Image (cartoon, helix red, strand yellow):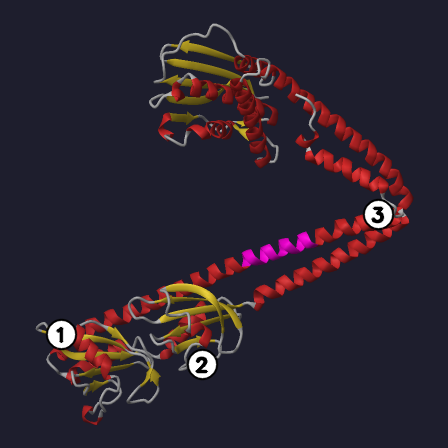
């Protein structure tokens, strides 16, 4: 296997960089200044990218929080509306109302209204004539209901309905109503209407508002505000802003960007009540997210420029010192070459063993071992080279065999950490065993099973792992040891500080691997 520089592109890049640096015609101070600038500016850009990524994550978190807040307020709203509805349905069962004794019903209505100071109860017939009002005792002076469509819907469906915002006929103020049918002998005879004080809903959203940067509204089914913070006096009775109105009816719950009635850009979410069709809208000012972004970017650029100018000045003044460092840099490059060549020599030795007969099977074996080594290094990289657990090593090696049927591979054992060298060797050994099972053992047919279990002995100083095969082809003891067998045996002894044995039972091979843990 001859040396091939293309195997190690990073080394080639280092060599080319050194050559290009040596051929440069620029003065040393200028080159060092460019080097400092070329190092610092990418760091500034990288820091800016991180800050923007954090901003994007904060924005996603804020959008999720806005939606969650809208949902929570809608749940509170639904609970309050259901409480009103339930109480009104109880009122419709009063015998005084059922028989039309409105003077007697007035005493019962007062008890209900004590829960809602400022609320109004009305009773109307099918034609919308007001037969009872908690505001006036003389029903003959009461006007017709001015939302007859609600009255008709109550009589038509026999179910509670919830109105949009409208101007009440008696007090001439904007109200919403909860209306329930009064049923006698299976027939709707009255519409019991309750207009709760708007302050109930206003107080509800004021309590739920996280901070002054949030905008919260409760809209009727047509998108008109009947409770809002901020600026309730100027906005109640107004329709939602155009950007919000265009989106708020498209889904039961949704999040999007809007501009408020005060022309403030918002991250907004809406949640619609299934029962009442009222909509809760919640928004947070985008400025609260953008301002920290701009501030952090400005600070990063300022600090980066300070470092840049300091570095350039240092480079210009310390050219002689840096020149001496160039010689040291050359020595480091030579050391890098030396270490890479040593690594290559190890690879050549392994290849020499594997490719001695130059068969396709052995070449495949070598490639498989390299993949096992790469997977072990990948696992260690994920663990920041602090080691890896036995279960992670086993899972990584067996992953290709779990695609068809997970039930064929049974793995059990406690959490046991391995040092980086032992994790690599354990991965190589298990790869050899799995390869043998796939070629000749339990994984070579459709019915074989593999069991991998391990335990810790001698006060957590020794690991014992057992690989058991069953259901495969009939097993016979091989007549000679191949390279894979020697790898298993020597690797367990020299790298794991233990041993590896195999019993070729008729039912399947059983491998036992001992590994020192200290």
Q: Can you say whether 29 is above or below 86 in the image?
A: above
Tell me how far mark 1 sits from mark 3, CA to CA.
92 Å
Between marks 2 and 3, how big is the CA–CA gap? 63 Å
Query: Is the residue under label 3 in contact with that under label 2 (CB below 8 Å)?
Result: no
- On the image, numbered disc 3 is attached to which residue? 32
Above or below — where is 352 with respect to 398? above
Picture residue at 51% right of the left edge, 27% below the top: 390
Residue 277 lies in what quarter of the image? Answer: bottom left
| Lower position in the chain sequence, tag 2 or tag 1 | 1
Q: Secondary structure at mark 2?
A: helix
Relative placement, left or right, of 439 versus 518 is left
Question: Can the viewer see residue 256 in this picture?
Answer: yes
Q: Circle 1 sits on which residue?
A: 183
What secondary structure predominates along the stretch shown in magenta? helix
Task: For label 3, count other residues whose C-alpha is less than 10 Å away and answer few (under 14), some (14-19) or many (20+).
Answer: many
Asked whether the viewer can see residue 497, the reply is no
Give the answer, above or below, for where 439 lies relative to 255. above
| Percent x, y of residue 253 | 38, 63
Within-10-Å neighbours for mark 2: few <14, some 14–19, many 20+: some
Numbered disc in front, either 1 or 3: 3
Query: Which residue occupies 88% across, 50% down?
Result: 316
Instruction: Find out whether residue 49 is within the magenta segment.
Output: yes
């Amino acid at each position: 296997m001859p040396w091939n520089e293309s195997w190690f592109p990073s080394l080639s890049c280092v060599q080319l960089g050194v050559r290009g640096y040596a051929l440069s015609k620029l003065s040393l101070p200028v080159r060092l200044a460019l080097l400092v600038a070329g190092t610092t500016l990418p760091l500034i850009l990288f820091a800016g990218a991180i800050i923007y990524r954090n901003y994007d994550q904060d924005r996603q978190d804020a959008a999720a929080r806005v939606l969650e807040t809208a949902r929570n307020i809608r749940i509170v709203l639904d609970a309050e509306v259901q409480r009103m509805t339930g109480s009104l349905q109880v009122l419709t069962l009063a015998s005084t109302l059922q028989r039309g004794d409105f003077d007697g019903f007035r005493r019962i209505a007062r008890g209900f209204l004590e829960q809602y100071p400022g609320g109004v109860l009305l009773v109307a017939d099918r034609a919308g004539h007001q037969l009872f009002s908690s505001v006036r005792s003389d029903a003959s002076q009461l006007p017709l209901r001015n939302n007859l469509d609600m009255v008709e819907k109550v009589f038509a469906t026999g179910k509670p309905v919830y109105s949009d915002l409208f101007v009440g006929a008696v007090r001439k103020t904007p109200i919403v109503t909860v209306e329930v049918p009064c049923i006698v002998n299976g027939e709707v005879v009255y519409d019991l209407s309750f207009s709760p004080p708007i302050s109930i809903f206003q107080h509800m959203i004021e309590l739920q508002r996280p901070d002054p940067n949030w905008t919260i509204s409760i809209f009727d089914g047509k998108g008109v505000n009947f409770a809002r913070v901020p600026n309730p006096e100027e906005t109640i009775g107004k329709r939602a802003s155009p950007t919000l109105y265009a989106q708020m009816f498209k889904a039961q719950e949704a999040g999007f960007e809007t501009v408020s009635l005060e022309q403030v850009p918002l991250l907004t979410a809406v949640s619609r009540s299934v029962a009442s069709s009222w909509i809760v809208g919640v928004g947070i000012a985008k400025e609260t997210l953008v301002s920290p972004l701009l501030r952090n970017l400005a600070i990063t650029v300022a600090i980066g420029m300070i470092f840049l100018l300091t570095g350039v000045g240092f480079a210009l003044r310390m050219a002689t010192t840096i020149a001496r460092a160039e010689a040291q840099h050359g020595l480091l490059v030579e050391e890098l070459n030396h270490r890479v060549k040593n690594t290559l020599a190890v690879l050549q030795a392994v290849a020499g063993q594997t490719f001695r007969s130059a068969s396709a099977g052995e070449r495949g074996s070598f490639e498989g071992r390299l993949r096992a080594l790469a997977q072990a290094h990948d696992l260690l990289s994920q663990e920041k080279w602090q080691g890896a657990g036995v279960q992670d090593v086993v899972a990584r090696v067996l992953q290709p065999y779990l695609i068809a049927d997970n039930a064929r591979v049974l793995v059990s054992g406690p959490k046991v950490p391995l040092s980086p060298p032992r994790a690599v060797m354990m991965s190589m050994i298990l790869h050899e065993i799995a390869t043998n099972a796939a070629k000749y053992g339990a994984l070579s047919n459709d019915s074989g099973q593999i069991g991998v279990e391990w335990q810790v002995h001698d006060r957590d100083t020794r690991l014992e792992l057992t690989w058991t095969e069953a259901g495969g082809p009939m097993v016979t003891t091989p007549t000679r040891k191949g390279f894979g067998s020697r790898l298993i045996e020597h690797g367990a002894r020299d790298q794991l500080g233990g041993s590896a044995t195999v019993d070729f039972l008729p039912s399947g091979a059983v491998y036992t691997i001992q590994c020192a843990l200290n």
